Image (cartoon, rainbow, N blue to C red):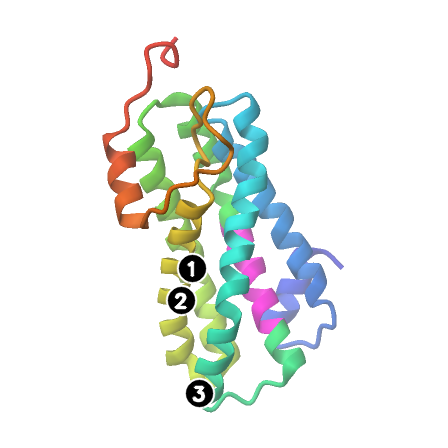
Amino acid sequence: MTLFAALDDLLRNRNTNRPFLLFFGAILCYVAYGMAAGFFQGGAQIGVALIKVPLILLGSLALCIPSLYVFTALSGTQLDARGFAKALAGFAGIAGLILIALMPVIWLFSVSTLSLGFVVWLHIFAWLTALAFGRQFLMSAFGAASRAAGLWLVLMLLVSLQMTTYLRPVLWRDAGQPLFAREKLSFFSHLDEVMKWEPTKRAMH
């Protein structure tokens, strides 16, 4: 069974017992997307990005699982543990497919521009698009708790932005800069720094 087939079973409300296949397929999509993002700087940063992007997305999802369970349970969802796992797997799979569909566009702008601010906003747009398609699936999966699932997506967005800040730098790392920044920083401040960033003269050649 392929990732596409497993997702098709979920979307058509067919029985599927392979949520782990969906998670595994989603991880592969996140890795490929991260690799495309790493081409902004190129070199070793490709490897860094293909590791950090899945960590950001899967870490954000893991941190938000308890809140999704509580939100939907209090809103009257009837899903058991297996159904909840399938809903999460479906969301992760759909988000992965959207990101992999946008990967060629991400790669093009990564290799053809030195504007870090523009590329960051492009990634935010891609993630918002993935969340929008994932929202449709979650609202269908949770039924009466669809509004709670929609509220959860806002939390997921905020957490993923902060997780990106926590695991920075992802797209660009100056010579001698550690793999992980030590300073505490909110994603608002991080975005402000990104907008003010300018490449060094060496990087432009």
Residue 136 makes an appearance in the image: yes
Q: Earlier in the sequence, mark 3 or mark 2?
A: 3
The CA span between labels 3 and 2 is 16 Å
The image shows residue 168, relative to residue 141, as above or below, that is above
Q: Quadrant of residue 7?
A: bottom right
Residue 131 disc label: 1
Residue found at x 27% / y 36%: 193
Q: Which residues are magenta?
A: 86-98
Q: Nearer the viewer, residue 89 or 41?
A: 41
Q: Which residue lies at the image location 58% right of the left edge and 85% below the top edge? A: 79
With respect to residue 30, does 154 lie above or below?
Answer: below
Element under disc 3? helix
Residue 144 numbered mark, or none? 3
Distance between the Cα atoms at labels 2 and 1? 7 Å
Classified by dominant secondary structure, the portion drawn in magenta counts as helix
Q: Residue 118 location, x and y as percent?
A: 30, 34
In the shown orientation, is residue 78 left or right of residue 160?
A: right
Confirm or deny contact between disc 2 and disc 1 (CB under 8 A).
Answer: yes
Q: Residue at x 48, y 34 (%)?
A: 37
Residue 97 magenta-drawn?
yes
Mark 2 crowd level (few <14, some 14–19, many ≥20, 10 Å Cα): many
Q: Amino acid at mark 3?
A: Ala
Q: Which mark is residue 153?
A: 2
Identify the image quadrant of the N terminus: bottom right
Q: Amino acid at mark 2?
A: Leu
Q: Residue 51's x, y, as percent?
A: 59, 40
Q: Answer with the quarter of the image where residue 6 lies.
A: bottom right
